[in-house]
Image (cartoon, helix red, strand yellow):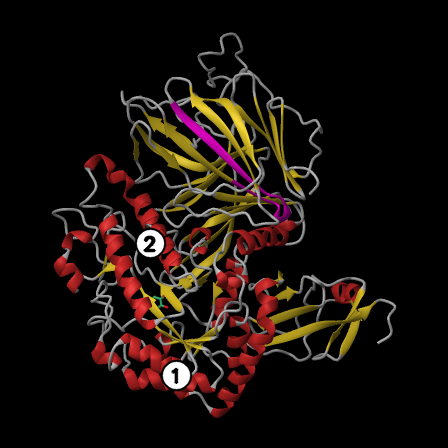
Amino acid sequence: MSRLSITAQNGLFQLDTQNTSYRFRIDEHGVPVHLYYGARLPVDAPLPLPQRRDIGFSGNPGDVNDDRGYSLDTLPQEIPCGGSGDFRDPMLELVHANGALAADLRCQGHEILPRALPLPGLPALYGTGNDPGETLIVTLKDTGSDVYAKLIYGVFARQDILTRSVVIENRGASEVTLERVLSLAVDLDAADLTMTAFCGRYAMERLPETCPVGRIKAEIGSVRGHSSHHYNPAFLLSRPGATETAGECWGFCFAYSGNFIASAQVDQTGRTRVLLGIHPRRFRWRLEPGQSFSAPQVLLSYSGAGAETLSHHFHDVIRAHLCRGPWAERERPLLLNSWEAAYFAFDRPKLLALARQAAALGIEMLVLDDGWFGERDCDERALGDWFANTRKLGGTLGALAADIRALGLRFGLWVEPEMISEDSDLYRAHPDWAAAVPDRPPVRSRGQLVLDMTRADVRDWLFACLYDILNESKADYLKWDFNRSVSDAFSAALPPERMGEFYHRFILGTYDLLERLRAAFPALLIEGCCGGGGRFDAGMLYYTPQIWCSDDTDAVDRVSIQYGTSFFYPASTVGAHVSACPNAQTGRSVPLATRAEVALAGTFGYELDPARLTEVEKDDILRYNKLYHRANGLVRTGVQYRLSPPRAELAAWAFAARDGSCLLVTVVRMRPGTAAPPIPLRGLDAHARYRCAALGETHTGAEWMAAGLCVERELRQYEAALLLLERVGQTGDRE
Ligand code: GLA
């Protein structure tokens, strides 16, 4: 881009990306007033200013004496505060030392940085050499105290992504308490939007659900201590009639893994207030003089061309500016995970047999899942005992890993660091390290308790354990699990007045430990996990470039789960494996081809015992593994198209090469039926000619996209087809 993306002129700020603009202005009272977020606008394009009318019961700030039309209750704002006379839901609520809940922030100045700004201890989009990002910081001061707020706007122009967050600073002489600090407020000029959120439960995550946004609030959130299986911290707002490929929509994605709230509600002026941030329930943060608080980052984007384009913005920025480490961009080792292959029932001969059979199938890594440490023969005990069970492993972890490596495989390991079993050496030595409310029996879930990650001593101990395990085993991969929600939010190490900080400090503690581990083992590939996809969010993706998508490995259910996941998260981050049939979770049997073709739309691997495969299945697996190596580059770096949703008779998706050279289409028949309509195609160069060898047809991109794709044979229920369209020339060329 020729000029900077941030313009600041006479109190007017405009943030431009390739196709979008975001505009606000500092009004005559110093209040940042939101003006516009939508399709790209020239900086000098006039926009109507929000009308000012004397509306009953919407009062006027104390310093605005004779203008009854000026009310913070009716202005679209960038940082609405509780106690300011704005009665809509606020972004910020603070309580002063005298007990007053009040904040009225007025602008003091601004600063523009030619780079992205990291947030201390938190995930944030980072700049790169040729795409450094830009930052606008607007500093505001409370009229009645020395509390300052820095509104931070990031711009990633190429991907049409903005970021928002806020830092609250107490520069006064007495403490203040933050009762609510959200990361984003935006008052969109629309009263007829719908919200699409991604909802579910354990083993059925991220199913899209849409509801109207009216004066009755649309709201989702989590107070489980993790972003949750139930509501993903990302959502869309769409204009009426917006579809996958047309119409206006906005996307909001929270780069945070803990409690969150997201809401949209129409106000009396006909605008929609959108809020996203840390859930205020169970949150209270004390700021002593000189202290500051950083709210986590929100990623936001706008598309005038439907949800698919919005997804592309998020996919691109997550891949290029959020995921880190050497594995973020590389093909991941093709793995066999021991969980559904053996659960807790393994010993050394069994593991070596798995490794041998895996190697014979062209698999590249054995991941030793749960059950290798302490007395862990079931899920009731030993979490926290992070030393090898030498009886089960037939020796040390290092020796086992070496033997597996000698078979030509890499070695990976499962851990669940943030947890503790009461039946563990760790609990017997440090009962106060478990999060529990004194004099009350703690809530157990999966028979386990949560470790107090707010404590530095707990994290130091965990780091030492993980360091030893990784050092000894030379593991290439770590699966970082988290298998319960956090209910007893109490730390023996926090003073009573700071107990409301538990949940956020917990997540900061987890991030801190992950960051230390990344620094100590920069080549390590970490896969996030939370009973499947209960912490599948942009926060974790900053530390783990892939996340186990769901414990439901049934390929048919996975079509829906991976479909919902794809609205914000790229396929390169989606942990997906082929498992045995009948499926362990659902009992359903699905052809191996379908299981493989669905898992190919993720990181790919296996979760089964190769000893139980037939010779025919083994031959098929050898072919799928070759296919993985051929197709994964396209899946990881290409452009994803949701061609037909899982609710249709035929679900279909595709990955297009960025240079237009090919399109890989997957079609799954979801329910029995008669002839289904052709699958619409996108992502082809209209002027190029493409051949589909499986169909024996060659057409121009324009023709393929106009006619759609008819699968060569009638697919029976749960059968799938994988079709590759390859460019064979430009229009006018002879074949
Ligand atoms: C969670 C994970 C599974 C497996 C088990 C082990 O449920 O999602 O993949 O690792 O824990 O206990």
- The quarter of the image holding the C terminus is bottom right
The answer to whether marks 2 and 1 mark residues whose Cβ atoms lie closer than 8 Å is no
The location of residue 132, given as percent across then percent down, is 57, 45
Pointer 2 local density, CA inside 10 Å: few below 14, some 14–19, many at least 20? many
| Residue found 30% across the figure and 63% down from its top | 467
Question: Helix, strand or loop at disc 1?
Answer: helix
**Residue 670 drawn above or below residue 592:** above
The location of residue 639, given as percent across then percent down, is 63, 60
Question: Helix, strand or loop at disc 2?
Answer: helix
| Residue found 33% across the figure and 59% down from its top | 482
Residue type highlighted by circle 2: Leu
The kind of secondary structure the magenta stretch mainly shows is strand
Q: Nearer the viewer, residue 1 or 277?
A: 1
**Residue 651 drawn above or below residue 693:** above
Residue type highlighted by circle 1: Ala
Q: Is residue 354 left or right of residue 708?
A: left
Image-quarter location of ligand 1: bottom left
The location of residue 103, given as percent across then percent down, is 39, 23
Residue beneath label 2, please?
513
Task: Please give the range of residues in magenta.
Answer: 147-163
Whether residue 730 is visible, yes or no, is yes
Q: Does the closest atom of ligand 1 sit within 8 Å of the Cβ of label 2? A: no
Q: Quadrant of residue 296?
A: top left
Q: Quadrant of residue 584?
A: bottom left
Residue beneath label 1, please?
406
Q: Earlier in the sequence, mark 2 or mark 1?
A: 1
